[in-house]
């Protein structure tokens, strides 16, 4: 959530407490806000709705931990679903060609884990650990409810070689929703995931800025 969601969130929590014939104190609300503000408001509403209709837990006013558990569960479901797509793609298509998934988080996680080609170098004994690391990283990005910086295309063996040799590049393979894949490719030049600046250039820029104030 962001600051614009604050009042909607406050009204929502007050409504939940009212449903259970309870009043909420400022202290209790602060606890709720601090516990949930890193999640998406829509996801929070869905989690409360699932709690209210639960035949057992729904009898009682939820605690922040109850809602966090539901929210984390949903991010785990997403992570497992994403891994299923990655695993199937790698097993059926390999890492020879470039690929574009329709989920930018998949791109970021694979990039952070060494890239698409590296995934193809793992053996079956390593695969369960790769899956676990992927899902953990994916959950972390998913819980922030923001699109992370990511490479537009996950480069395979063929085009890694073609780039080095100056040859024409092979077309990439899109996995999933075509329009979403295209949007991910177009975002690749938005800004680098890690910015590097030479110290001399940075010092020169700082000196010019300092001079402007004199």
Image (tube, rainbow, N blue to C red):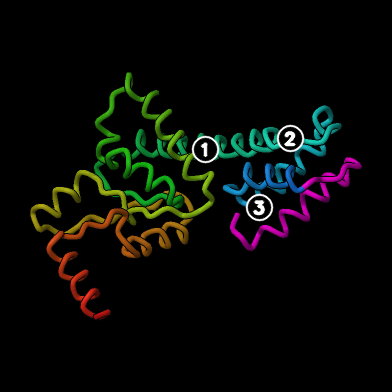
Q: Nearer the viewer, residue 134 or 22?
A: 22
The stretch of residues the image draws in magenta is: 1-25
Q: Secondary structure at mark 1?
A: helix
Q: Secondary structure at mark 3?
A: helix
Q: Earlier in the sequence, mark 3 or mark 1?
A: 3
User: Residue 34's image quarter?
Assistant: top right
**Residue 63 numbered tag:** 2
Residue at the top extreme of this rendering: 125
| Residue at figure coordinates x 64%, y 33% from the top left | 69
Q: Can you say which quadrant of the picture contains the C terminus?
A: bottom left
User: Which residue was labeled with disc 1?
Assistant: 81
Q: Residues within 10 Å of mark 1 (few under 14, many from 20)?
A: few
| Residue at figure coordinates x 70%, y 42% from the top left | 47
- C-alpha gap between disc 2 and disc 1: 28 Å
- Mark 2 vs 1: CB contact within 8 A: no
Name the mark nearer the viewer: 3 or 2: 2
Q: Can you say which quadrant of the picture contains the N terminus?
A: bottom right
**Residue 93 numbered tag:** none
């Amino acid at each position: 959530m962001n600051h614009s969601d604050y009042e909607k969130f406050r009204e929502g929590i007050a409504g939940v407490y009212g449903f259970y014939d309870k009043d909420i104190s400022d202290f209790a609300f602060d606890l709720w806000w601090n516990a949930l503000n890193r999640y998406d408001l829509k996801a929070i509403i869905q989690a409360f709705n699932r709690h209210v209709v639960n035949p057992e837990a729904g009898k009682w006013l939820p605690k922040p931990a109850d809602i966090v558990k539901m929210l984390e569960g949903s991010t785990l479901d997403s992570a497992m679903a994403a891994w299923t797509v990655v695993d199937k793609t790698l097993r059926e298509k390999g890492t020879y060609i470039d690929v574009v998934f329709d989920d930018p988080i998949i791109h970021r996680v694979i990039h952070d884990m060494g890239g698409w080609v590296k995934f193809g170098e793992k053996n079956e004994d390593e695969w369960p650990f790769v899956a676990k690391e992927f899902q953990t990283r994916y959950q972390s990005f998913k819980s922030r409810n923001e699109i992370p910086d990511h490479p537009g295309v996950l480069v395979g063996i063929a085009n890694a070689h073609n780039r080095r040799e100056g040859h024409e590049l092979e077309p990439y393979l899109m996995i999933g929703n075509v329009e979403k894949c295209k949007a991910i490719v177009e975002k690749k030049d938005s800004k680098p995931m890690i910015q590097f600046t030479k110290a001399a250039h940075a010092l020169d820029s700082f000196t010019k800025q300092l001079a402007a104030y004199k």
